[in-house]
Image (cartoon, rainbow, N blue to C red):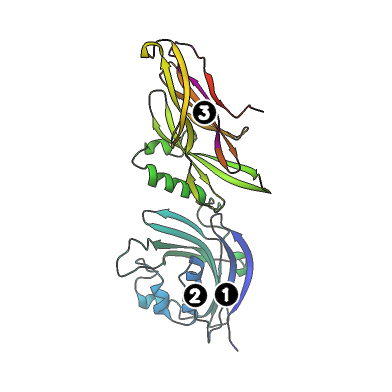
Amino acid sequence: MNRALARTVATVVSGCLVVAASTFAYADTDAVYIDDRSDPAALVRSLYSAINRHEYARAWDYFGETKPAADFESFAKGYEGTTSVEVATGGVSEEGAAGSIYYTIPVAIRAGQQDGGEKVFSGCYTLRQLSAQTQEPPFKPLHIEKGELKPDTSAFENALPASCGDGSMPPQRDTTREKAKAVFAASYGERCDASLSEDDETAGVADYTIRHHTRNDDAEKEARLFRFPCRRGAYNETFVFFLTDDDGGVRQLQFAEPELDIHYANDDIEGKLEAVNVVGYKAADELMNADYDEATYSIVAHSRWRGVGDASSTGTWLFRDGRFSLVQYEVDASYDGEINPQTVLDYNTAP
């Protein structure tokens, strides 16, 4: 009885998508029919399923506009002496670009010949998936853009390339970071200066991992905090913060701030400061000159009311039980050229 034989060769970690490297051997009669475009490895296996079954039109159709031969007749003729094909696939890497996702996958094949011999080839396939949301009929599914397989003198079991490209494993995609950037762009794309969020070593998105315990759960949890620069002025820069939740979602943080009633002699801010009173609270979605202190699990923001810095406010929000709470607020409301803040709220140092 002729049937497909599948066996695992190795597990290859691609960095962004983990795929078990496996081989699929097909007999030259009653070869298994596979027609699966659900992922790159399945599509490559489908290609060689078609070749094993001598269904060359189906194999030809797995390629996109760039075909593997000058015409279909030449393509089919290239397999005249092939009786069966065994294929091994490795770890898949992916990269998005302008409405498409490109995949690369290492491939090795062992082609049985009519004279009883066999040939081994190895290399990489590049596949492309166009955005399904933006397409119009006729729909273009996942397809092979190109395949670069060359004769290999290695044994088939050793011929599978470790990776494609420059030989290094592709970097792992940080899907949580990508999600946070997407939420930020959707909410603040027109409000904030996009150039401030470029990823480089001196600016851009700050990313913190917070390991913590909640009050009623001894199990350690992990949260991700993202800080996005938004707007920059002469002496202040605003930031927006996002935090992951237990379900893997990303939510924007709103920060409680005291609403102040400040009195000056003769209602002149250059005059004597008479009183600073907290008359309520408000929520802020942007913080001035803010950063996260990993040692104290706190976000500290310092707002300069004017360039010389003698008038300002400083807030501290402590991370506990999975959220940031306002615990301390200081105000220097006197425009006297001196730095002399007074504490108007303090839950941080109280016993």
Q: Amino acid at mark 2?
A: Tyr
Q: Quadrant of the C terminus?
A: top right
- Residue 348 is left or right of residue 129, and the answer is right
- Does 208 appear above or below 106? above
> What residue did someone put label 3 on?
315
Report, in whole angstroms, how far the alpha carbon at label 1 lies from the one at label 3: 62 Å
Q: Which mark is residue 48?
A: 2
**Residue 111 lies in quadrant:** bottom right
**Residue 115 lies in quadrant:** bottom right
- Does 133 appear above or below 224? below
Report, in whole angstroms, how far the alpha carbon at label 2 lies from the one at label 1: 9 Å
Question: Where residue 333 sits in the image (x, y, percent)?
Answer: 45, 18
Q: Which residues are magenta?
A: 325-338
154 in the magenta segment: no
> What residue did someone put label 1 on?
24
Residue 174 seen from this side: no
- Does 15 appear above or below 141? above
Circles 2 and 1: CB distance less than 8 Å?
Answer: yes
Element marked by disc 1: strand
